[in-house]
């Protein structure tokens, strides 16, 4: 876990947080953890702004390729269709045969 030291915090703020902690039957540290965790979550507006900023990194003149197409191209480059051998049907290979578990409760006496 990380630690943070906040200096020069107004005494009224600390007292208010202590009162909130007492109301919730928590320590001041736990109250601060909860408050900081809540404050760290991005709001909907912040998430939208972040998405727009990421989108702006790609110039409008660059055409986008569908990610599914890129995945297919990468897969096909690694395993050309012509050299692929047919895989056995599911369940026809011993590797896919379900194993029946032994009932250990019936075999042991307590």
Image (cartoon, rainbow, N blue to C red):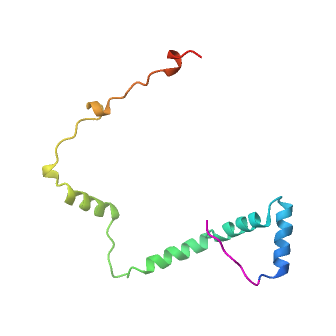
Image-based side of 90 in relation to 77, left or right: right
Q: Residue furthest bottom?
A: 8
The picture places residue 24, in percent across and down from the top left corner, at 82, 60
The picture places residue 48, in percent across and down from the top left corner, at 55, 73
Residue drawn at 86 percent across, 62 percent down: 23
- Of the 4 image quadrants, the one containing the C terminus is top right
Image-based side of 68 in relation to 26, left or right: left
* Quarter of image, res 22: bottom right
Q: Nearer the viewer, residue 42 or 65?
A: 42
Q: Nearer the viewer, residue 5 or 83?
A: 5
* Quarter of image, res 62: bottom left
**Number of numbered tags placed on the structure image:** 0
Magenta region: 1-8
Residue drawn at 32 percent across, 75 percent down: 63
Determine the main secondary structure of the stretch shown in magenta: loop
Q: Residue furthest left?
A: 82
Image-based side of 89 in relation to 55, left or right: left
When the figure is inspected, residue 50 is found, relative to residue 37, above or below; the finding is below
When the figure is inspected, residue 88 is found, relative to residue 75, above or below; the finding is above
The picture places residue 72, in percent across and down from the top left corner, at 27, 58
When the figure is inspected, residue 84 is found, relative to residue 2, above or below; the finding is above
* Quarter of image, res 39: bottom right
When the figure is inspected, residue 6 is found, relative to residue 29, above or below; the finding is below
Q: Nearer the viewer, residue 51 or 78?
A: 78
The picture places residue 95, in percent across and down from the top left corner, at 29, 34
- Of the 4 image quadrants, the one containing the N terminus is bottom right
Q: Nearer the viewer, residue 1 or 58?
A: 1
Residue drawn at 23 percent across, 36 percent down: 88
Q: Is residue 103 magenta?
A: no
């Amino acid at each position: 876990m990380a630690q943070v030291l906040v200096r020069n915090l107004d005494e009224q703020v600390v007292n208010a947080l202590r009162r909130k902690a007492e109301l919730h039957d928590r320590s001041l540290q736990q109250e601060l953890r909860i408050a900081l965790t809540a404050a760290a979550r991005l709001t909907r507006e912040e998430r939208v702004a972040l998405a727009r900023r990421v989108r702006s990194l790609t110039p409008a003149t660059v055409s986008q390729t569908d990610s599914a197409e890129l995945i297919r191209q990468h897969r096909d480059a690694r395993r050309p269709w012509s050299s692929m051998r047919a895989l056995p049907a599911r369940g026809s290979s011993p590797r896919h045969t379900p194993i029946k578990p032994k009932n250990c409760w019936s075999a042991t006496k307590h």
